[in-house]
Image: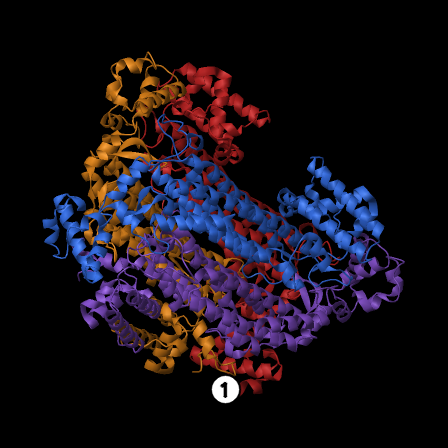
Chain colours: A red, B orange, C blue, D purple
Amino acid sequence: MKKPWAGRFKRETSKIAEHFTESISFDNRLWRYDIKGSIAHAKMLGKQGIITKEDSEKIVNGLEEIAREIENGKFRFREDLEDVHMNIEAALIRKIGEVGGKLHTARSRNDQVALDIRLYLREEAKEIISFIKEFQKTLLNIATKHLNSLMPGYTHLQRAQPVLLSHHLLAYVEMLQRDEERLKNAFERINVLPLGASAIAGTTFPIDRIYVAKLLGFDDISKNSIDTVSDRDFVIEFLSNAAILIMHLSRLAEELVLWSTEEFGFIELPEAFTTGSSAMPQKKNPDVAELIRGKAGRVYGNLFSLLTIMKGLPLSYNRDLQEDKPPLFDTVDTIKSCLIVLNEMLPGVKFNTERMHETAKEGYSTATDVAEYLVKKGLPFRKAHGITGKIVLYCIRKKKKLEELTLKELKTFSKLITDDIYSCLKAEESVRLKISQGGTSPDEVRRQIKRLNQLIR
Amino acid sequence: MKKPWAGRFKRETSKIAEHFTESISFDNRLWRYDIKGSIAHAKMLGKQGIITKEDSEKIVNGLEEIAREIENGKFRFREDLEDVHMNIEAALIRKIGEVGGKLHTARSRNDQVALDIRLYLREEAKEIISFIKEFQKTLLNIATKHLNSLMPGYTHLQRAQPVLLSHHLLAYVEMLQRDEERLKNAFERINVLPLGASAIAGTTFPIDRIYVAKLLGFDDISKNSIDTVSDRDFVIEFLSNAAILIMHLSRLAEELVLWSTEEFGFIELPEAFTTGSSAMPQKKNPDVAELIRGKAGRVYGNLFSLLTIMKGLPLSYNRDLQEDKPPLFDTVDTIKSCLIVLNEMLPGVKFNTERMHETAKEGYSTATDVAEYLVKKGLPFRKAHGITGKIVLYCIRKKKKLEELTLKELKTFSKLITDDIYSCLKAEESVRLKISQGGTSPDEVRRQIKRLNQLIR
Amino acid sequence: MKKPWAGRFKRETSKIAEHFTESISFDNRLWRYDIKGSIAHAKMLGKQGIITKEDSEKIVNGLEEIAREIENGKFRFREDLEDVHMNIEAALIRKIGEVGGKLHTARSRNDQVALDIRLYLREEAKEIISFIKEFQKTLLNIATKHLNSLMPGYTHLQRAQPVLLSHHLLAYVEMLQRDEERLKNAFERINVLPLGASAIAGTTFPIDRIYVAKLLGFDDISKNSIDTVSDRDFVIEFLSNAAILIMHLSRLAEELVLWSTEEFGFIELPEAFTTGSSAMPQKKNPDVAELIRGKAGRVYGNLFSLLTIMKGLPLSYNRDLQEDKPPLFDTVDTIKSCLIVLNEMLPGVKFNTERMHETAKEGYSTATDVAEYLVKKGLPFRKAHGITGKIVLYCIRKKKKLEELTLKELKTFSKLITDDIYSCLKAEESVRLKISQGGTSPDEVRRQIKRLNQLIR
Amino acid sequence: MKKPWAGRFKRETSKIAEHFTESISFDNRLWRYDIKGSIAHAKMLGKQGIITKEDSEKIVNGLEEIAREIENGKFRFREDLEDVHMNIEAALIRKIGEVGGKLHTARSRNDQVALDIRLYLREEAKEIISFIKEFQKTLLNIATKHLNSLMPGYTHLQRAQPVLLSHHLLAYVEMLQRDEERLKNAFERINVLPLGASAIAGTTFPIDRIYVAKLLGFDDISKNSIDTVSDRDFVIEFLSNAAILIMHLSRLAEELVLWSTEEFGFIELPEAFTTGSSAMPQKKNPDVAELIRGKAGRVYGNLFSLLTIMKGLPLSYNRDLQEDKPPLFDTVDTIKSCLIVLNEMLPGVKFNTERMHETAKEGYSTATDVAEYLVKKGLPFRKAHGITGKIVLYCIRKKKKLEELTLKELKTFSKLITDDIYSCLKAEESVRLKISQGGTSPDEVRRQIKRLNQLIR
């Protein structure tokens, strides 16, 4: 087929080149935004008298009809028409005749595709933000149920100090809160109208970009036509935000995998979210969590794809930019599906709070409290730390827990120790006393839940 | 040497392990921030009565003395003391005695190192922002000098339409503006006090984190102690901002390389910023630009390092996090040096405006203007485009430029063409008429320069 | 639907989890290899008497029938059957009854999927190697045609010394040769039978892995069942080979883009492999080359996806490994399509050898020859280099070419210069004299073409 | 300072540019190889009569003296001399006078730096291979000690089937074996002489590259001068091999972290390779393992750096290539230090074999053996799997272990079950019977240890 841009060409495109360069197999996903943008453009052309009001209306009606056809699965996208833009323009001309050829006045595919991606990503970013909020609420609900559940807090995956399970879960709510803020910041740079940059230089037609921005709900218009057609910052910024988000989810996933081992035994995953083995009849595997962890690789890879693509490209538009879409689409799909499945699965997770509580008490996890006790009795911290270390060493040798030591034994390490030490050896007490801002005491955690509940809705 | 934390240990650390785990060889760079943070912490401990006022003062004085020693190169950092924190604490105790051991009350290296990095990155981010502004001003100055210089605008590295050199340079100012905005957004998430999270759970001492935040100029305090010690989002966010920034610089570098070829001949690089060849006596190479382009790889790699490190880590602090510093420091140094050298080099670049102007006129670069001319005469754009394509094909066959066609020749393509077409075949006219917002007309470019000048200072 | 592995499960899988964890939407591509492997496995089970000969034959026949159905598009893959393995097993049981349930004796999906990927990748690696060879031949053909075509050799994208176009093209043949060697090395590690590792531990059945290896054409069997099911080295190694290969292609693509600019004007791309602009009627863009350059990002991203996925995974099989297939499949497709399209396009490229020749002579490109001339007259090279540099500087000031200098002028720089210098100022002579091994003299290039022709076929 | 290449330059290099472009701060590490290569080059120049024998000897002696000075710390590298090559050449000229300027005859820094890196990487690759072998031997030693130690084999981090600890350790020996093979393959492509390519085109001097190759121990010479100076494949290939290797180590590190948790309790790390906490007196952290896991990020980042740098670079040498050294050096250092520290630490790891053995028996880990038992009694595997699943479900409900079920209870699931089932419920028996090639039976593991012992030394 003769291409719509082929006036100066003597030969047809090679089938191999056509297949190699086509993007319709993946950018057809943008059809809704392409039509939406074209309608706004056509209205502006009409309003500005660049085309007649009648032509403008014909075009708008034609485009709306095409939208309905696509919606109803009655539209066939053709590879020889390259991309979503040319497919829709060609359909428009087929439908309403030569007047359809007026739509592309004062624009180019260079600004058109930038518009489509921005419209698409704007919607998806909003939806991802709402999914984050949903998941934060789910975590807050679970946290609220576990305001008094103790668990061991880990550093280096070694038991460090007792903390509240709710406090641990809130750590993820905080991460997600930053993810949301980053996406909102990015949104400001996404929500900028590129249309009107035309191919690279702007146009000689008296277009009204601010009017188009208003029609399409953009907060601002881009300020430099050359930059506009060569810029994919907004995609990269989104991808890097997505990379941090999936990193957070991969950490949660790792904990779900760890906690559901028989060794930890902290949680039982809902059967509906685990799978069995084709060979081993007893297996119940945390596949969902593992896949989320693995999908971090996918999103990271997508980010690096686009960074690589953009590296060292001279201005302005280069066809390399077509490769921005597969990593973007894949990232949006991946992030959304991970948030959805986690949000469904988490409420079904059974926390073995007794086991967690038991574990929180073990492993000399209140040793820091002993050191702080000694400081309050007058020792410099570094010295108190040293003495407590020796007490722990003694316990290991004697195979005793801290609370099993007699006062006499304890006094051999420091005369400052008196009977009141025993209360600070209890995990519950250790937690209760962490009253510093952001600490794990039930009062402080309750305060944070309240703050987050207000912040999120 | 017996480690300060080694109360419970029976054996000394292996030399090999000591060397493998040390960080003092690179984190000594943080000494200034470590001391600054410790001083604020000590003041707070004194104010809250956790230690006495006197002890607090002794500690503060001791730390200030250590700072002077380091400043004057009189301090020896020791590998067997692992990191900057332990080196300074040990020096403090050597200097002021056992009371120095009180400094670490109610804190841990986990929150301390987070504090140091945040203080460091805060300063560096500010400086990078100021370097960006400087470079933007430099570009604006050059753009202002070239308000009437024409050059070919490129898409696909093929001449597309004539544009103003100033317009082209402003594209980079826009990119840098986004870089700055991203860094400012990131700054809000950097400038949060982590101290007080202690090891993981908060502390039983009545600390005042808001007071510390005030002393150190933080806008907010972190809200969850577990998240606080395991969070490196702010570093990754900075690294991804840096990756986008160096990507922009790599594009500029690519253009400098291209433009300084004899084939393009658009610029001459200042000799002081080029180098010769050890073998080929005639060479004058654009090394600075090439290295900037290459350094994109370095910064991308750093981002990927940290994303990989954080993937799938269970909460909270893990020693893997120590590996955050080399990629961060390297990125800060790289970004700053690239901005400095570009800012120095660009004013010395000689633009061969005549050559650029000549080139802007070639290559049928006003063909789009012909199509727009035909649209204004009543043709649908798609049709006008087709006709113009045929005119171009005719020119190629006849080896003629567009403006060399006679009216008679032109009329064979469309009867709508009249004598007034010749004005729109001129590159100067083509540029002058691109009056759309963000377009390349001198008026619009002047307007943008004014806006940017106001924005930047 | 009740899952085949669900004996111990009380509840059905959630639809959301089912959709999240399925792989049939992409691993169906492996059906041919899955069936091939199952047939070999069934034959071995029969031969070893683990199942009866009759059962073995029934299974083989059933599998062959399924293969025909899939081939003919009469097979429906179902998402609720998760993956290609379970889809085919379920179909087999539907088709031949309970005996089909004997196929999975002494194996697990863990070793089965490893088998499928190895069989798949083995074929694809072979095909890629053959595509590389084809493309090398194409380049050799073109090189042979340009044995006497001069062009400027570039370093730093500045003209360095005249070289033969054929010599330049052979540089790519050398790169591709290394790509081929790397793939052949990798092939040895791909072509190893994993089947028989079963889930993780091996099996209690008297299987004969060497027999299966023979049936399937594997050179060796894997040696450790735990390693076997958790190993994806062979995929990563392939992906990293692919990354280097696409890097080479991206360099060639960059040169095609550069050379087809009007500024360089070295080549004209065949129209059938370029595209036009929707807005600018004169444009003829090197899209194929740009896309290849961009696809480097895609392949790099795929490599980093899998490296990230594997980082820090405990042994042995983890579901994260399912994420190995999308980056692998995408890389195979990308590499093959790039090689195909380049191989088709290159023979159509028109080299403007006159322009190249002209350019080769400019830019003081024989200055190194002058220095070598002076060395042969007795000067130390460093001194000869310095003198030649001064001659070049003089030329620039006087706007003269080297060959335009009079002997008198030349003698002011060194008395050693005599009339014989003029021959070495000629580009043709400069090239002819580069007789060192691997150098650009026509004799040497001819020798290399001969060697490569023998090597490749 | 006037640069040695500055004949044609009017102005001195800017200090900022000088500092930005220098590489001496990191490439001084190559001095030994630079001198070694120069000596071979000088000898060849003498042998070929390109310079006199006397001059050749003077140069060789001068270079050897410089080598001694550097060795003894008496040499000062200067930033204004850019790189290691120019520093040494300048020192040579200072030392032996103008004749030193003859050394650079028939070569360029472009081929010289390629030579230096190849010589460096050749030595380092050999050393890394020897470190791998050492570590394999260490693992084999430990495995030999644990030929009868049972542990749970994991898939999805859920207990899957009992395996031998030695079998598990051998999985890593296999991975390391592949790492070694990959490095050996890469070595063939590293060990190729680039010298003689000169700047890009070869040289007019009658050099003997094969002689130089022989002097320096290269197996081959490069075949195309343009490719030679622009090729960094051998570095990237090494970096990707290193990435796979550190991935393996990160998996081992993850297991060391997991196994040393109190929850797993499989191992105790030697105190000399763990560290304590500044705040929590009881902590003993697996820092070495964590850092190794983290360093995967570092090596991955380095690989990505260089891939990015090379993407889309036109031929031949570009200054971007200077950025190859920092990621290469950092990777070599990282890999070596990780192998060293692991090799030192592993022998000190205490395996709690009793705990491992106990754990191996739990979690229905012999369910697969039950299914295989039923198959041997005549059931199709899929059916046997289903029945076993139901038995497991029954056990979970009744809170019984498999071996605690009565024969009566078992028979309710299948009449085929008889008294002989109890032996296959034992973990020891389960392991003993995995006699398939590569399986976990002690006989097979012993066979593999023997094979590996032979392979490695």
Say which of B117 and B334 sits in front: B334
Image coordinates for residue D270, horizontal then vertical, percent: 55, 78
At a point 65% along the width and 76% down the height, the residue shown is D144
- Quarter of the image for residue D452 reads bottom right
Q: Quadrant of the C terminus of chain D?
A: bottom right
Vertical placement of C236 versus B372: above or below?
below
Q: Mark 1: which secondary structure?
A: loop
Image coordinates for residue C336, horizontal then vertical, percent: 53, 43
The residue that disc 1 covers is A415
Say which of B275 and C277 sits in front: B275
Q: Quadrant of the N terminus of chain D?
A: bottom left
Q: The residue marked by circle 1 belongs to what chain?
A: A
- Quarter of the image for residue B368 reads top left
Is C128 on the left-hand or right-hand side of C34?
left
Vertical placement of B65 versus B433: above or below?
below
Amino acid carrying label 1: it is: Lys
